[in-house]
């Protein structure tokens, strides 16, 4: 049996929580999210050892695969998407699902790993937010991974096929046009599913909620909710 260090195990568990957050963000269903994560890992372990070794940033690869599975399900499902979006910072939210797998990693080591990961995510997300607020396309491009992707629910109340945009240049232009092209919009840095994200509001009404996936010091995926039904809980007086 291959030995796995406590630090590596903590990272593996964190990747699964990260993928669950993505799937829950898109569907709001723990059952569906769990199936998506299982399929993502099935595809990961279906790769040969050399193929896996050649993936420089596993989190970015896993994020893209999970996002692709989500998009396939969105395009194929006939019914409207669930309208529930988790409250920001709510304790015990579905996105903070119980940690699966063997409980061999020391709690202290895992806690340090979690804190370091969240701190890194916060730093990168705030750079992204500052670039969005300034409408600085160059700064956005600088914080995005070269092969990053952006996914939006389209803003409509009816389900439609969702097509992601790939590449730092294309995403920087897309995000600049989408998030900075609204007059009188305020950009707030707030917890989104337990991690630092963005909420855009006009006169106190949320017009977009943005979550980001981070690997190392770059944003690897941008998840944008525009559907008004999903934004009601984010309105402020």
Image (cartoon, rainbow, N blue to C red):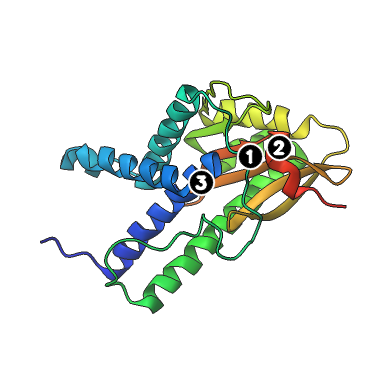
User: Dot 1: within a 10 Å radius of its alpha carbon, few (fewer than 14), some, or many (20 or more) residues?
Assistant: some
Q: Which residue is mark 2?
A: 229
Q: Dot 2 surroundings within 10 Å: few (below 14), some, or many (20 or more)?
A: some
Q: In the image, residue 24 lies at what x, y percent?
A: 51, 46
- Whether residue 215 is visible to the viewer of this picture, yes or no, is no
| Whole-percent x, y for residue 161 in the image | 53, 21
Labels 1 & 2 near each other (Cβ < 8 A)? yes
Q: Nearer the viewer, residue 4 or 85?
A: 85
| 2 or 3: tag closer to the N-terminus | 3
Give x and y (percent) for residue 237.
88, 52
Element at label 1: loop
Residue wearing tag 3: 24
The quadrant the N terminus occupies is bottom left
Q: Is residue 34 visible?
A: yes
Q: Where does label 1 land, which residue?
A: 83
> Residue 62 lies in what quarter of the image?
top left
């Amino acid at each position: 049996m291959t030995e796995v260090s406590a630090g590596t195990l903590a990272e593996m568990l964190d990747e699964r929580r990260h993928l669950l957050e993505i799937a829950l963000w898109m569907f709001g269903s723990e059952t569906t999210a769990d199936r998506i994560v299982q399929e993502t890992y099935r595809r990961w372990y279906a790769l040969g050892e050399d193929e896996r070794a050649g993936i420089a940033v596993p989190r970015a690869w896993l994020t893209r695969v999970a996002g692709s599975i989500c998009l396939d399900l969105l395009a194929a499902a006939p019914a409207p998407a669930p309208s529930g979006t988790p409250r920001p910072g709510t304790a015990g939210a579905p996105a903070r699902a119980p940690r699966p797998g063997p409980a061999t990693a020391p709690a202290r080591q895992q806690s340090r790993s979690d804190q370091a990961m969240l701190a890194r995510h916060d730093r990168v997300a705030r750079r992204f937010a500052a670039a969005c607020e300034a409408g600085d396309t160059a700064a956005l491009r600088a914080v995005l991974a070269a092969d990053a992707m952006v996914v939006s629910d389209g803003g409509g109340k009816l389900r439609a096929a969702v097509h992601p945009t790939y590449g730092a240049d294309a995403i920087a232009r897309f995000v600049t046009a989408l998030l900075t092209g609204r007059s009188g919009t305020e950009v707030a840095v707030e917890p989104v599913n337990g991690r630092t994200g963005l909420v855009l509001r006009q006169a106190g009404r949320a017009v977009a909620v943005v979550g980001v996936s981070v690997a190392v010091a770059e944003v690897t995926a941008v998840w944008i909710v525009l559907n008004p039904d999903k934004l009601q809980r984010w309105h402020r007086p």
